[in-house]
Amino acid sequence: MSALQLHALDAIASQVVDALEKYGTDAERMMAAWPDLELYREVSDQIEGIRLYSGALPEARVQWVELLIAHAELIHFLWRLQYGDREAALGQIGPVRDRHADAVAALRRRCMRLASRSRQNVAG
């Protein structure tokens, strides 16, 4: 891989990390403020941006899919909390939040490793 390609991958991985920071914070805000539909739209736009960046990082594909699934489960959970069986949903909030946070952290770690590795390859 050329130095230019490595720099591009480093930049993309860094953009994913930055996007995940904002997404993680806003997803927590969205959960606390549910059903704030404006915040829901912002978080949905952010996950779409992360998808676009992650598409250029095949080595982060597994972690991206895990985040996408966790995001969908979180949104499904929030709608169920709002319009479904609230008692049952409240009993599941911990595992849903934990899985989502774990997926965000896993993609962040993977992208940080990719960025670090590309920097080492350019330097070496």
Image (tube, rainbow, N blue to C red):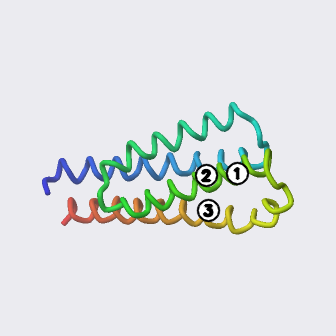
Residue in the foreground of this view, choosing between 86 and 120: 86
Task: Classify 10 Å Cα crowding around label 3: few (below 14), some (14-19), many (20 and above).
Answer: some
Hey, which residue is sitting farthest top in the picture? 38
Estimate how packed mark 2 is, as few (under 14), some (14 to 19) or many (20 or more) residues with alpha carbons within 10 Å: some
- Does label 3 or label 1 sit earlier along the sequence? 1
Amino acid at dot 3: Ala
Q: Provide residue 77's location: percent of width, then percent of height.
A: 70, 54
**Rendered location of residue 45, percent (x, y):** 53, 36
**Residue position marked by numbered label 1 in the rendering:** 28
Q: Is 18 or 100 nearer to us in this picture?
A: 100
Q: CA distance from mark 3 to mark 1?
A: 9 Å
Q: Secondary structure at mark 3?
A: helix
Q: Residue at x 52, y 57 (%)?
A: 69
Report if the CB atoms under discs 1 and 2 are less than 8 Å apart.
yes
User: Looking at the rendering, which quadrant does residue 101 occupy?
Assistant: bottom right
Q: Residue at x 75, y 62 (%)?
A: 93
Residue 91 relative to residue 12: left or right = right
Tell which residue pokes out farthest to the front in this image: 84
